[in-house]
DNA sequence: CGTAGATTTCAGGAAGTTCTGAAAAGCCGG
DNA sequence: CCGGCTTTTCAGAACTTCCTGAAATCTACG
């Protein structure tokens, strides 16, 4: 591996975290490298920088493309494919959330739906199904929320985050106003 | 494996998803089984139900305890330890979020902080550090939001989810009111 | 204490994944 | 359609993780 120390530390960390994130070391390193790189890199650049085999890089890039985490970029007068990550970290977040949902949540949701359609044949099955319904309900709320929020443009998403739990205070305020108005009508 | 079909399907699914969630098959199955079970189970019950070795169950339970995902429950007149999952799925969600953050986000955050303290020695390093700063900023916003939201009791959390992106409309309304009031003052 | 029941630890085999070099397949200008 | 450059595929080596049975340890009661 042949990189400035700051970059190397970052790349190595992503490699190690890779396994916790369900991607392998090389894929993590490639991503980290592309992320901090000032210009798009081609496979050979990556081989050079990380000191892994050419074919490993090829498979890694393939996987990152499947995740929509890297973008192909054409460099004039160079036949080799080059890759970058999106500039905007919020955009990266969106892609990441979408892909993880697709892989980690959606399959479970569909299995749950299927199992909830069936008729339980015994008391333990009835209980199990009730528990599945609870889980299904929770996941569905979360994904509905996510579907709404993901459409927000960055600006508003940031504002929403900034607000945090204070939102509920805002909600309370609204409720008080509504109550107040109702009260006046009823009087 | 010796389970009613509904339960079996659920357990098998969790086993398969296990690998995507960074836990192994057996751990996933044990969790699923405890989750749908109407009463706490002991290790032998699990061995019986899943058809895996006793020691495997022991290690699985150990890991689930490390994740705070199962609770030991004492059964009168039975020396064996029994385990359940929390009743409340919202509670489960909280624990899950907390543990995943601890394992998947916090280490990166601390590495980023460290690297941002260093002085870049070259132009590529300067660029890399700027990118790290962007990533750090985003993660910090997200975790701050999370820290606030996780304190909400279930009721309010649910309300917040229900609201979804409409929050921003509420925000807009507030802004309009503020602008209006300001306008009147300035007139 | 001693002992029966319960749990944990651990070495090593099974299963799964990651990585490599070599060979095959694509692609493009001439 | 040839020849050089690039990318992909793939079999198997290297490595990692998972799982088991056997042995060690723990624990509570008589």
Image: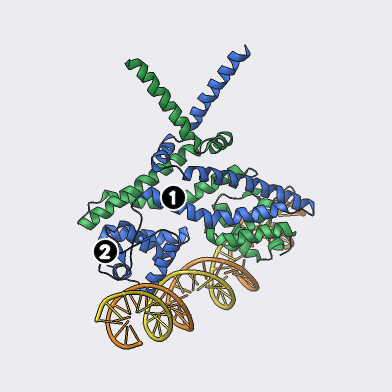
Chain colours: A blue, B green, C yellow, D orange
The answer to which of marks 1 and 2 sits earlier in the sequence is: 2
Q: Nearer the viewer, mark 1 or mark 2?
A: 1
Mark on residue A23?
Answer: none
Q: Is residue B37 visible?
A: no
User: Residue A130: horizontal and vertical position, in percent?
Assistant: 71, 47
The crowd level at tag 1 (other Cα within 10 Å; few <14, some 14-19, many 20+) is few
Name the image quarter holding the N terminus of chain B: bottom right
Residue pushed farthest top? Answer: A187
Answer with left or right where residue B90 lies relative to residue B129: right
Crowd around label 2: few <14 · some 14–19 · many ≥20 (10 Å) = some
Residue A172, percent across and down?
53, 26
On the rendered structure, is A127 left or right of D19? right
Q: Residue at x 54, y 53 (%)?
A: B66
Write down the residue under mark 1.
A94
Number of marks: 2
Where residue D1 appears, x then y in whole percent? 35, 87
Q: Is residue A138 above or below residue B186?
A: below
Q: Secondary structure at mark 1?
A: helix
Residue drawn at x 66%, y 59% as measured from the top left:
B11
> A150 above or below B183?
below
The residue that disc 2 covers is: A3
- Same chain shared by disc 1 and disc 2: yes
Q: Would you identify the image quadrant in which residue B187 lies?
A: top left
Q: Can the viewer see residue A66? A: yes
Q: Residue furthest left?
A: B122
Name the residue at 47% across, 45% down: A150
How far apart marks 1 and 2 lie (CA) works out to: 29 Å
Chain bearing mark 2:
A
Subunit that carries the residue with mark 1: A
């Amino acid at each position: 591996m042949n990189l400035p120390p700051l970059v190397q530390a970052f790349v190595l960390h992503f490699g190690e975290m890779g396994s916790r994130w369900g991607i392998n070391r090389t894929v993590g390193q490639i991503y980290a490298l592309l992320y901090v790189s000032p210009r798009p890199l081609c496979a050979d650049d990556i081989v050079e920088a990380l000191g892994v085999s050419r074919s490993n890089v090829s498979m890694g890039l393939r996987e990152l493309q499947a995740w929509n985490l890297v973008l192909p970029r054409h460099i004039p007068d160079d036949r080799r494919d080059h890759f970058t990550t999106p500039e905007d970290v919020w955009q990266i977040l969106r892609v990441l959330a979408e892909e993880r949902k697709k892989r980690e949540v959606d399959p479970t949701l569909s299995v749950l739906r299927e199992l909830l359609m069936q008729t339980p044949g015994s008391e333990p099955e009835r209980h199990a199904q009730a528990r599945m319904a609870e889980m299904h309900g929770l996941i569905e709320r979360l994904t509905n929320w996510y579907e709404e929020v993901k459409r927000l443009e960055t600006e508003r998403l940031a504002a929403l985050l900034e607000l945090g739990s204070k939102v509920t205070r805002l909600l309370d305020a609204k409720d008080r106003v509504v109550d107040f108005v109702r009260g006046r009508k009823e009087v």
